[in-house]
Image (cartoon, helix red, strand yellow):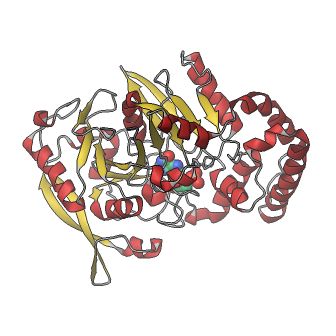
Amino acid sequence: MARNVVVIGAQWGDEGKGKVVDLLTDRVGAVVRFQGGHNAGHTLVINGAKTVLHLVPSGILRTGVDCLLGNGVVVSPSALFTEIDRLTANGIDFAGRLVVSPGCPLVLSSHVALDRAREARRGDGAIGTTCRGIGPAYEDKVGRRAVRAADLMDDGALAERVRELLDFHNFMLERYYGQEPVDAARTLDELRAAATRLVPMLGDVAERLRVARAAGRNVLFEGAQGALLDIDHGTYPFVTSSNTMAAAAALGSGVGPAYIDTVLGVAKAYTTRVGGGPFPTELGAPVGEQLRSAGNEYGATTGRPRRCGWLDAVVLRRALLASSVDSLCVTKLDVLDGFETLRVAVAYRWRGERLEYPPATAEALAQCEPEYEDLPGWRSSTAGATRLADLPAAARRYLERIEALLGVPIVMVSTSAERGHTIMIRDPFA
Ligand code: IMP
């Protein structure tokens, strides 16, 4: 019986989902992205060779696995082509494997200009976006004025849509933000050129998924960003502009929710965040610095240093609740090697109350004081471990405590960025 597994990040992104997805792709017929765009950065390391993916699903490194971009993904044609060209130059075969939904809204250069202008206007209150135009592209989707991949099939309709959209964007850029306008004619030319390459990739993603299931092939739905960056359930307004929770896998690919069999949440053994917004367990130097350098915590998309802190069970509970996560993968356990004591936030204190779930507003979250539980660290290496029995007793206790705090089994543990350095306790596709 074919299984459909959704993999989501359970924190603020960068949990190491790419590695986990890549590892599991030998069990699947297809990998589907269902939200986000090229704001994502998924790093895969195979036999020491590093590949960073932004838009292309993390199944591309396995021959024979279809890679699908569902309607929930916003697609920058130029970013997609750059990525395909880079991967092709490295010997990866795309032939017939990449399918893009006609419903994908396109990210244009005017979206990038608007993203930058907004961030600059916000000043100290900036979201810290990736400045890839993601937010403005989703706004246009909801505003029913987006140029979608399907529009590339009809030149007349495309010209009209681009004219209307750029008229609106340039009004905002010039009159509201005092910025240079974007050349509408050039944008149209770029899209016409993109059509030649993108139109042959268009296909019915939902139908592909139906056929895969009927043929008994497993499918992996690859989340981008993380649960707490969800537009509805995250730390609004310091969030991304899509739903990152597991339910988005259905809407963003065109299949019904009953199609999802299991949800694997991926969480680092500690916590990181890029960009602005509250982060209760954030650590300053020297411990935060130690985590950053041990974990090489710099953004795969923007190169920005990530903010680092202790593991936060409160944040994870929200992810588990809103995404019905039924199993967990803990990544980067090896980064904690060498700490004398580890801390885990088990609850927050806020205005005299004890909270086990994050409060509804970013303002309240910023006022929360973590209630920590201290656990003994381990002074030996876990890097590269592939069996639970190989871990020091304190590392096993740390994992057991996470399971007990969250009430969800840990089924995988990642002990370095390398594909094979993983402890597989229970196969999510089994
Ligand atoms: P946007 O998605 O570019 O609009 O950025 C909104 C917020 O999401 C910012 O805090 C970004 O740093 C964060 N973000 C977007 N994509 C990622 C990701 O792949 N990993 C981690 N943070 C991300």
Name the side, left or right, on which 389 lies relative to 262: left
Could you say which quadrant of the image residue 320 lies in?
bottom left
Residue drawn at the location 34% of the way across and 38% of the way down: 429
In the foreground, 349 or 329: 329
Extreme residue toward the left, this view: 393
Residue drawn at the location 67% of the way across and 63% of the way down: 121
Could you say which quadrant of the image residue 24 lies in?
top left
In the foreground, 82 or 386: 386
In the foreground, 395 or 196: 196
Name the side, left or right, on which 376 lies relative to 386: left
* Residue 221 appearing in the image: yes
Report x, y in % for residue 267. 33, 49
Location of the N terminus (image quadrant): top left
Report x, y in % for residue 161. 85, 50
* Residue 54 appearing in the image: no
Name the side, left or right, on which 36 lies relative to 283: right
Residue drawn at the location 48% of the way across and 20% of the way down: 63
In the foreground, 22 or 275: 22
Count the numbered circles shown: 0
Could you say which quadrant of the image residue 145 lies in?
bottom right
Residue drawn at the location 24% of the way across and 47% of the way down: 410
Location of the C terminus (image quadrant): top left
Image vertical order of residue 89 relative to residue 30, above or below: above
Report x, y in % for residue 392. 10, 39
Report x, y in % for residue 128. 55, 55
